[in-house]
Image (spheres, rainbow, N blue to C red):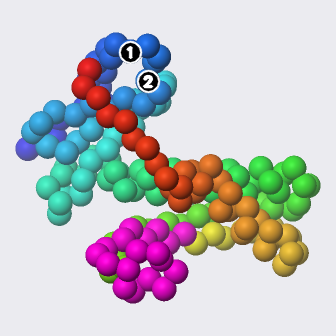
Amino acid sequence: MKPRSLIAAPMPEIISNSPPHVIVRGDSTGFAQAVQIGPHRLAGDEPVAFGGTDTGPSPYDLLLASLGTCTSMTISLYARRRGWPLENVTVSLSHSKIHAVDCADCETKEGKIDRIERKIHLSGALTDEQRSELMEIADKCPVHQTLTSEINIQTRTV
């Protein structure tokens, strides 16, 4: 059975004081989701191995994509402003859950914690000092700052 596409389905009208920037819609029969971000349309799903239909990236894949995109943009902007010879930025990311006791740098020592591994490749005729500075700037991207700070999520029924 071919999965039904949610991307073509109209997005519901949501009533609020300010227009939402991101709207996610799915039905209760599976994991496939239609994602509307302003004028952009994406899909979200889970892999078949986890009960999904693999019609889009998983929620964690989307989270990693946000961090990778922001990291690359931040590094590129910094290099452009300084006139540095950065040609390309490639950010590779993965997510896993690890036992807290296995993390020497973590405050939490019990249970499991989330680990994101981020590998950054910078191409261009950069000096070692420029590369080092760009790697420091990677941690200053706004999404990295959000993920490593306290987050307050307010949820309500509408």
Q: Is residue 110 above or below residue 25?
A: below
Residue 32 visible, this angle: yes
Residue 35 visible, this angle: no
Q: Residue at x 39, y 68 (%)?
A: 114
Q: Magenta stretch: residue 46 in it?
A: no
Q: Residue at x 16, y 33 (%)?
A: 27
Q: Is residue 130 above or below residue 99?
A: above
Question: Dot 2, crowdedness within 10 Å: few (<14), some or many (≥20)?
Answer: few
Please tell me how many numbered marks the rendered image carries: 2
| Percent coordinates x, y for residue 137 in the rendering | 73, 61
Q: Is residue 42 left or right of residue 12?
A: right
Q: From the viewer's side, name the closer residue of 147 and 76.
A: 147
Q: From the viewer's side, name the closer residue of 50 and 134.
A: 134
Q: From the viewer's side, name the closer residue of 30 and 136.
A: 136
**Residue at numbered disc 2:** 20
Q: Is residue 104 above or below residue 82?
A: below
Split into 4 quadrants, where in the image is the C terminus? top left
Q: Please name the amino acid that badge 2 sits on.
A: Pro
Q: Please name the amino acid that badge 1 sits on.
A: Ser
Q: Secondary structure at mark 2?
A: loop
Question: Dot 1, crowdedness within 10 Å: few (<14), some or many (≥20)?
Answer: few
| Percent coordinates x, y for residue 8 in the rendering | 29, 26
| Percent coordinates x, y for residue 15 in the rendering | 34, 13
Which residues lie in the magenta part? Answer: 101-118
Circle number at residue 16? 1
Dots 1, 2 in contact, CB < 8 A? yes
